């Protein structure tokens, strides 16, 4: 189920969502945007969409977004004009699905600079979805520990 960031009182959501909201708050602050740019999907795997306020030089007519999910972490994607699925350009990859907000911001900067040394073209499963407690603990870790 996709939901806005503000959840209704008493809503029974995925147990890791409060930790994900905290993590997204840190990442969006580092990017200079707010949580109003985000949506969450509470189904398995838990995922998030972050609309960015910029476009890439090679795709000047397409909106840019970051996608996050509990198995693969961050990816950069562009919107299509036809309402189809987003086109994923690169995956951040790395040892964790919850890298520091600074690392996510460097990923976005590299996309704008057309720097292909940051991230990777193919997805890699970093963890398996399902253990909500482990995911919540991972998302709550201080950025310096990620």
Image: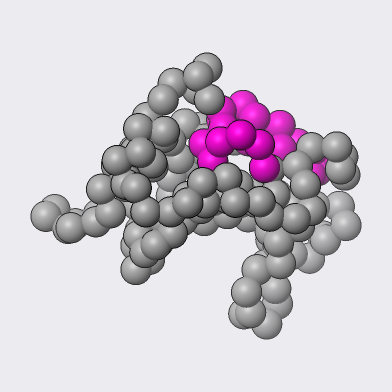
Residue at 63 percent across and 55 percent down: it is 65
Judge left or right: residue 51 versus residue 48: right
Q: Hey, which residue is sitting farthest bottom in the picture?
A: 82
Choose between 126 and 32: the one closer to the eye. Answer: 126
Q: Looking at the image, is 20 positioned above or below residue 123?
A: above
Q: Position of residue 129 (x, y in %)?
A: 43, 54
Residue at 63 percent across and 79 percent down: it is 84
Q: Position of residue 50 (x, y in %)?
A: 54, 51
Q: How is the image coloured?
A: one colour
* Magenta-colored span: 93-113
Residue at 83 percent across and 61 percent down: it is 59
Q: Looking at the image, is 96 positioned above or below residue 121?
A: above
> In the rendered view of the protein, which quadrant contains the N terminus?
bottom left
- Tell me if residue 15 can be seen: yes
Q: Name which quarter of the figure residue 78 lies in.
A: bottom right
Q: Position of residue 76 (x, y in %)?
A: 68, 52
- Tell me if residue 76 can be seen: no
Choose between 139 and 56: the one closer to the eye. Answer: 139
Q: Hey, which residue is sitting farthest top in the picture?
A: 144
Residue at 35 percent across and 32 percent down: it is 137
Judge left or right: residue 68 versus residue 41: right
Is 118 part of what is drawn in magenta?
Answer: no
- The number of callouts visible is 0
Q: Position of residue 108 (x, y in %)?
A: 71, 40
Is 105 part of what is drawn in magenta?
Answer: yes
């Amino acid at each position: 189920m996709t939901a806005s960031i503000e959840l209704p009182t008493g809503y029974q959501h995925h147990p890791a969502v409060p930790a994900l909201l905290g993590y997204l708050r840190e990442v969006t602050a580092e990017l200079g945007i707010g949580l109003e740019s985000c949506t969450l999907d509470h189904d398995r795997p838990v995922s998030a969409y972050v609309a960015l306020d910029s476009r890439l030089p090679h795709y000047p007519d397409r909106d840019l977004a970051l996608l996050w999910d509990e198995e693969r972490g961050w990816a950069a994607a562009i919107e299509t004009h036809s309402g189809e699925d987003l086109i994923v350009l690169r995956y951040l990859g790395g040892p964790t699905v919850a890298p520091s907000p600074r690392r996510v911001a460097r990923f976005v900067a590299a996309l704008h600079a057309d720097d292909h040394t940051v991230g990777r073209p193919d997805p890699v499963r970093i963890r398996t979805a399902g253990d909500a407690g482990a995911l919540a603990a991972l998302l709550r870790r201080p950025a310096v520990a990620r």
